[in-house]
Image (cartoon, helix red, strand yellow):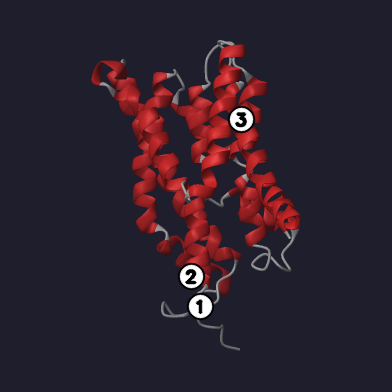
């Protein structure tokens, strides 16, 4: 009996690997901006004395850009672990909605598979996956491939920035300490959806200012502002519905 010949180079990849490859390729464009964004994060981490190994561990275990920026901003001895954990939790509550929007995509998959893929879900590969799903069938491996692409770009950019920051020694003399403020100003503008956001944003800002004055030297104003703004946004539809019932 003749042994079976090896598959030819043109043989199609198994479906999961094909989707993984397609997801990775689809996210290459946004990965470039993620790497640039990550380099700023790495620079700020170096400014706080966070080393290469610590940064890589943080990237692999947390992998949440905006939350990691907040962590680095709060990174000071003694480390405020409870405040950092609560702030990260508040910032990442948006993943509840992102996860809900992916319910059909994850239908029939195991809990282990869900946990692995969701760990690598970002705003970028989530948006790319939904856009691709509107045109052709995709599965969770497409999103996983995109997540791996974004993770590699984030790690490469942040580790590069970290090394540059370590070489500079004192980024403030070049005005690079303003990078944190600039990044979050840009993020804030990108989240603006119109007048409906005004009240929650003002509520969050007011509560944050009050807590910052009431508890000076701490970072509790970050989760306090986030929670109050989120609560305000959650209550607005119910208040509007109650107002409409009274008018009718």
Quarter of the C terminus within the rendering: bottom right
In-front residue for pair 202/143? 202
Secondary-structure class at tag 3: helix
Q: Are marks 2 and 3 in contact (CB under 8 Å)?
A: no
Q: Is residue 157 above or below residue 82?
A: below
Secondary-structure class at tag 1: loop
**Residue drawn at (54%, 61%), measured in percent from left and top?**
143
Q: Which residue is mark 2?
A: 132
**How dense is the environment of label 2, judged by Cα within 10 Å: few (below 14), some, or many (20 and up)?**
some
> In whole angstroms, how far apart are the C-alphas of marks 1 and 2?
6 Å
Quarter of the N terminus within the rendering: bottom right
Residue 118 locus on image (x, y percent): 62, 52
Taking 17 as reference, is 40 left or right?
Answer: left
Residue 114 locus on image (x, y percent): 68, 56
Q: In the rendering, which numbered label is found on residue 87?
A: 3
> In whole angstroms, how far apart are the C-alphas of marks 2 and 3?
32 Å
């Amino acid at each position: 009996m003749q042994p079976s010949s090896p598959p030819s180079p043109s043989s199609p990849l198994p479906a999961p690997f094909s989707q993984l490859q397609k997801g990775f390729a689809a996210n290459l464009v946004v990965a470039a901006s993620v790497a640039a964004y990550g380099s700023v994060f790495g620079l700020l981490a170096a400014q706080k004395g966070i080393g290469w190994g610590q940064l890589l561990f943080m990237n692999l275990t947390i992998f949440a850009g905006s939350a990691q920026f907040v962590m680095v901003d709060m990174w000071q001895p003694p480390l405020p672990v409870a405040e950092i954990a609560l702030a990260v939790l508040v910032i990442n509550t948006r993943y509840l909605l992102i996860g809900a929007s992916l319910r059909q995509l994850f239908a029939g998959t195991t809990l282990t598979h869900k946990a692995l893929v969701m760990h690598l879900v970002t705003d970028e590969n989530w948006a790319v996956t939904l856009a691709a799903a509107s045109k052709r069938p995709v599965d969770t491996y497409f999103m996983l491939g995109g997540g791996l692409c974004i993770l590699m770009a984030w790690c490469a950019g942040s580790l590069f920035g970290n090394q540059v920051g370590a070489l500079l020694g004192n980024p403030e003399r070049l005005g690079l300490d303003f990078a944190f403020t600039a990044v979050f100003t840009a993020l804030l503008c990108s989240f603006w959806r119109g007048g409906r956001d005004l009240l929650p944003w003002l509520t969050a800002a007011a509560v944050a200012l009050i807590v910052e004055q009431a508890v000076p030297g701490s970072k509790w104003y970050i989760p306090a502002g986030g929670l109050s703004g989120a609560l305000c946004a959650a209550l607005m539809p119910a208040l509007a519905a109650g107002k409409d019932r009274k008018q009718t």
